């Protein structure tokens, strides 16, 4: 058992030193979803605009789009529109921002200014008026919580079974611990992701994860049933590590699916 615990700790240290970009691709950092309401025929792309030049602008945005931009606004991201939601992201994220709808005939519809207020957020644009709106912050945070909670439960339940713990005997502590830690993540990490400073955001991301590692290790060591204390701690470390690394790859698609349903 000690050798297994030592191996898990070595894996944890190794993954901490993997390139941040490898883990960051799946995170909902500085991203929004845009849906179009009303008659959206003829829209070919949606662009994210900021009132300052972007350090890493998209390559070769459509000329019709750039020609229609008002003074003081710049393209930060641009994505094709196929009738479904459009995912726009950039680090850092412009604040405030506007969106632009490019039509087949070259006309461009600009929205008013909007502010992003949470890590995962869906905005709806009226295709006729250009009005941009979003759901209340309570509903938005609920979507974010359900998204991360579902993904975490699936991953950590699988790891629990791999460690030969009985799920039905440990269902209560398993659910309560994850409920508490995911609530903490939603109320803290989600706000930190709004930071315009990438290093600041990821520093606090790892800091919060470290706190959760400790809290869950102590809680599971005390309340899980079956096997030794060392095995319970090993499970807590492994489950958090796996859900952090693998879970980031699924958060974005799961949130996208939820945004269609809610």
Image: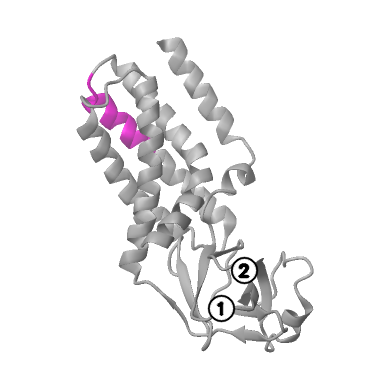
* SS at mark 2 in the image: loop
| Mark 1 burial class by Cα count in 10 Å: few <14, some 14-19, many 20+ | some
> For residue 8, which numbered disc appears in the image?
none
Note whether 214 is above or below 60 in the view shown.
above
Q: Is residue 131 above or below residue 204?
A: below
- Report the magenta residues as a range: 212-225
In the image: residue 179, left or right of residue 16: left
For disc 1, the marked residue is 40
Decide whether residue 83 is among the magenta residues: no
Q: Which residue is mark 2?
A: 81
- Give the mark toward the camera: 2 or 1: 1
Spot occupied by residue 114 in the image (x, y as percentages of width and height): 49, 79
Work out which quarter of the rendered image holds the C terminus and state it: bottom left
Decide which of 15, 31 is in the foreground and name it. Answer: 31
Residue plotted at (52% across, 69% down)? 34
Query: Label 2: few (<14), some or many (≥20) within 10 Å?
Result: many
Magenta: main secondary structure equals helix
Q: Position of residue 242 (x, y in %)?
A: 47, 33
């Amino acid at each position: 058992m000690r050798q297994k615990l030592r191996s898990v700790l070595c894996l944890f240290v190794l993954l901490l030193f993997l390139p941040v970009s490898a883990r960051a691709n799946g995170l909902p950092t500085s991203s929004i979803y845009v849906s179009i309401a009303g008659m959206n025929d003829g829209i070919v792309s949606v662009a994210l605009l900021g009132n300052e030049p972007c350090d890493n602008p998209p390559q070769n945005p459509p000329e019709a789009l750039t020609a229609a931009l008002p003074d003081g606004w710049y393209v930060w991201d641009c994505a094709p529109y196929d009738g479904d939601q459009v995912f726009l992201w950039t680090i850092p994220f412009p604040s405030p921002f506007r969106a632009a709808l490019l039509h087949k005939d070259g006309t461009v519809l600009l929205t008013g200014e909007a502010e992003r207020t949470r890590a995962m957020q869906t905005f709806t644009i009226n295709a006729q008026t250009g009005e941009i709106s979003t759901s209340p912050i309570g509903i938005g945070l609920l979507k974010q919580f359900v998204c991360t909670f579902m993904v975490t439960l699936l991953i950590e339940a699988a790891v629990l079974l791999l460690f030969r713990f009985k799920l039905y005997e440990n269902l209560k502590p398993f659910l309560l611990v994850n409920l508490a830690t995911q609530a903490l993540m939603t109320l803290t990490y989600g706000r930190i992701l709004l930071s315009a400073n990438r290093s600041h955001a990821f520093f606090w991301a790892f800091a919060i994860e470290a706190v959760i590692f400790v809290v869950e290790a102590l809680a599971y060591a005390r309340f899980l049933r079956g096997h030794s204390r060392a095995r319970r701690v090993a499970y807590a470390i492994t489950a958090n590590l796996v859900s952090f690394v693998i879970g980031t790859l699924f958060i974005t698609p799961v949130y996208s699916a939820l945004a269609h349903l809610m």
